Image (cartoon, rainbow, N blue to C red):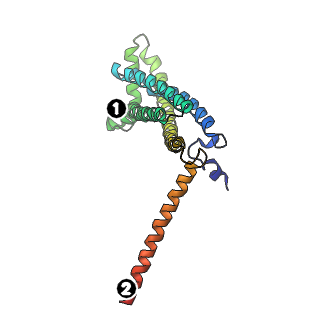
Amino acid sequence: MNLKGILFKDKTKFFFLYFLPDEVAALISVVLMFGVTVGDHYLNICMNDNYVPYVAKLAKYSKWTALGSYVFFFIGVFLKKIIFEQLFATIFTVYIFISGCFFYYNFASIIFSWTYRTAYNVFDYLTELYLYDHKELDWDENYNRLRSEKKTKLWLCMIAHIVVLLVMIYYNIILTEYMEKKKLEFSGELGENNLYENSKFQGNIKSSNITINDNDNVISKSNKDSQN
């Protein structure tokens, strides 16, 4: 088996945690994602100079809601109650959507706007907005420096935000697979180690049976046509 097959065989874990037991990998993952969520909050407000007050409040409330929801995941792992993990997953999914909205608000709406691409350069706009709010700064002396800083900051924040969003989406996929596995294990029908793999095996058998039945139907129909 090649390296890719080994790393991505278990879809319930981050690829670099494939060798760890489920619960250990899940706890390490959630700690890592806690840090990612904190970092994502600062990316959400990285262009904070331009925010109206209610947008900044939304960023603050969504951050604390998302961070608080991690408690539900820990409770679910230790008590083996899937309902707590599902609650965490729901809140986390909503947070990803909110973070995507902030990404659009911060970057996509201005970078891809016709007005800012043609009629008015976005970097000039951000620089002038900053200078209007900081009247103690000399316009001529600081304009070029501030414009360069705003340009660098915007592009770096945008790239970092894309990476963070992709990581959160990747984790959300892992979380869904993990909960599906644990839902089967917690049911206790076939034992913790075999139920998830057995369910996937049964699914493959059903798919194979459907394919075989379809092929049999095609062959049977062909035989009837040839007899006629």
Q: Which residue is mark 1?
A: 120
In front: 142, or 213? 213
Tell me, yes or no, whether the two marked residues, 2 and 1, touch with CB atoms within 8 Å: no
The amino acid beneath tag 1 is Tyr
Q: Earlier in the sequence, mark 2 or mark 1?
A: 1
Q: Which residue is mark 2?
A: 225
The amino acid beneath tag 2 is Asp
What distance separates the C-alpha of mark 2 from that of mark 1?
71 Å
| Residue appearing at x 47%, y 32% in the figure | 84
At numbered mark 2, what does the secondary structure look like: helix, strand or loop?
helix
At numbered mark 1, what does the secondary structure look like: helix, strand or loop?
loop
**Residue 208, image x, y percentages:** 50, 65
Task: Mark yes or no: residue 139 visible.
Answer: yes
Residue 224 sits in which quadrant?
A: bottom left
**Residue 40, image x, y percentages:** 49, 29
Task: Mark yes or no: residue 52 visible.
Answer: no
**Residue 184, image x, y percentages:** 51, 45
Above-or-below relation of 218 to 163: below
